[in-house]
Image (cartoon, rainbow, N blue to C red):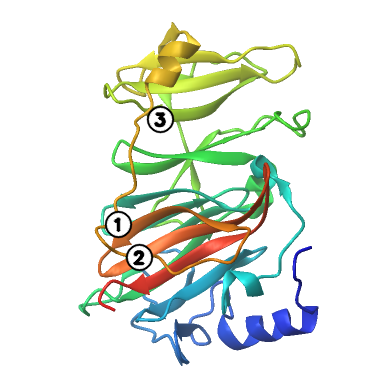
């Protein structure tokens, strides 16, 4: 049985360690492994236009965050997370992608939006600003598991996942969203390759293959008997050609994670790391509490590479 902490303790941690306010700069706090400090007006500048949550000062001790309903919450370890009920992975709030874009590191959060990291000023790369660019009122109804770069933009694909239950609600319109440094929320983006997808069907996954072609999967949502269709295109501006499932499977890259001798902090039983990235002088990794196809708590960890 999962160990659960009293609601009062969780609330106390939230209030003391990470007041994740939207649009308020004077009361934001910088989280460190030992103490908190106010974010300066200079650090929370108007560019980019995303809500800045915290100034993260990394060190030898890891900083742990849980994905809460209103944004990341600082916790002492994954075992101290609120531990929500397990949900099938398409419906759970967890990190589904991490990539570098220009001077930022971008994370995709299922059912929520984007988290973005940016180096703070001219320090040694161990201080990062954390932003949340989300529209949970819209995104909460959809699964987002594809994060990719096209047209020099980070893009996320939203769809109704029907693997565990019939699709609910209406088809997302648009299906693709991107970050814009001038917008505090994700904005819609038009993908030419999806232009000919018939009504009632949705693109579900898109990725760049080992042959540098783009691949995407489409599924009709109004029929339980519908089969997935697979397509390949030289660029996402144009609809792709139909391919078979064997060609789809063969398109995926098989890459082993490379930590370059760096060891991630250990996790308690039932928790696992799901992805990582090196950004400036910081190692950032996503983690989840997993049980079969279900996910409970989820979040991310930061630690200095100079420890």
- Residue nearest the observer in this picture, 91 or 168: 91
Label 1 secondary element: loop
Q: Which tag, 3 or 2, sits closer to the chain's start?
A: 3
Kindly indicate whether the residue at mark 2 contacts the one at mark 3 (C-beta within 8 angstroms).
Answer: no
Image position of 148 (left or right of 18): left
| CA–CA distance in space, label 1 to label 2 | 7 Å
Q: Disc 2 designates what residue?
A: 263
Q: Nearer the viewer, mark 1 or mark 3?
A: 1
Quadrant of the snapshot with the C terminus:
bottom left
Quadrant of the snapshot with the N terminus:
bottom right
Residue 44 lies, in percent from the top left, at 39, 77
Residue 242 lies, in percent from the top left, at 45, 7
Label 3 secondary element: strand
Residue 51 lies, in percent from the top left, at 49, 68
Residue 127 lies, in percent from the top left, at 32, 77
Q: Disc 3 designates what residue?
A: 207
Q: Disc 1 designates what residue?
A: 259
Disc number at residue 26?
none
Image position of 292 (left or right of 45): right
Let me know if residue 213 appears in the view: yes
| CA–CA distance in space, label 3 to label 2 | 29 Å
Kindly indicate whether the residue at mark 3 contacts the one at mark 1 (C-beta within 8 angstroms).
Answer: no
């Amino acid at each position: 049985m999962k160990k659960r902490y009293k609601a009062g303790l969780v609330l106390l941690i939230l209030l003391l360690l990470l007041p994740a306010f939207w649009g308020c700069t004077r009361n934001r706090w910088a989280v460190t492994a030992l103490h908190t400090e106010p974010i300066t007006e200079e650090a929370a500048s108007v560019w980019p236009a995303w809500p800045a949550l915290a100034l993260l000062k990394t060190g030898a001790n890891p900083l742990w965050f849980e994905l809460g309903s209103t944004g990341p919450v600082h916790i002492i370890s994954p075992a101290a997370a609120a531990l929500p009920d397990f949900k099938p992975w398409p419906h759970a709030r967890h990190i589904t992608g991490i990539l570098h874009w220009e001077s930022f590191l971008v994370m995709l959060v299922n059912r929520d939006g984007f988290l973005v990291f940016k180096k703070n000023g001219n320090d040694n790369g161990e201080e990062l600003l954390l932003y949340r660019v989300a529209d949970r009122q819209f995104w909460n109804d959809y699964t987002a598991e594809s994060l990719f770069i096209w047209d020099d933009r980070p893009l996320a694909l939203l769809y109704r996942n029907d693997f565990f239950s019939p699709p609910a609600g209406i088809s997302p319109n648009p299906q693709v969203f991107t970050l814009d440094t001038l917008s505090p929320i994700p904005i819609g983006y038009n993908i030419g390759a999806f232009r000919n997808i018939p009504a009632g069907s949705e693109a579900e996954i898109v990725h760049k293959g080992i042959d540098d072609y783009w691949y995407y999967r489409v599924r009709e949502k109004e029929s339980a008997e519908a089969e997935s269709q697979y397509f390949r295109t030289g660029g996402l501006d144009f609809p792709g050609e139909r391919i078979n499932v064997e060609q789809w499977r063969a398109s995926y890259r098989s890459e082993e994670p490379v930590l370059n001798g760096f060891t991630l902090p250990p996790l308690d039983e039932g928790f696992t790391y799901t992805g990582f990235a090196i950004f400036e002088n910081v190692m950032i990794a996503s983690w989840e509490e997993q049980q079969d196809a279900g996910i409970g708590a989820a979040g991310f960890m930061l630690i200095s590479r100079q420890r």
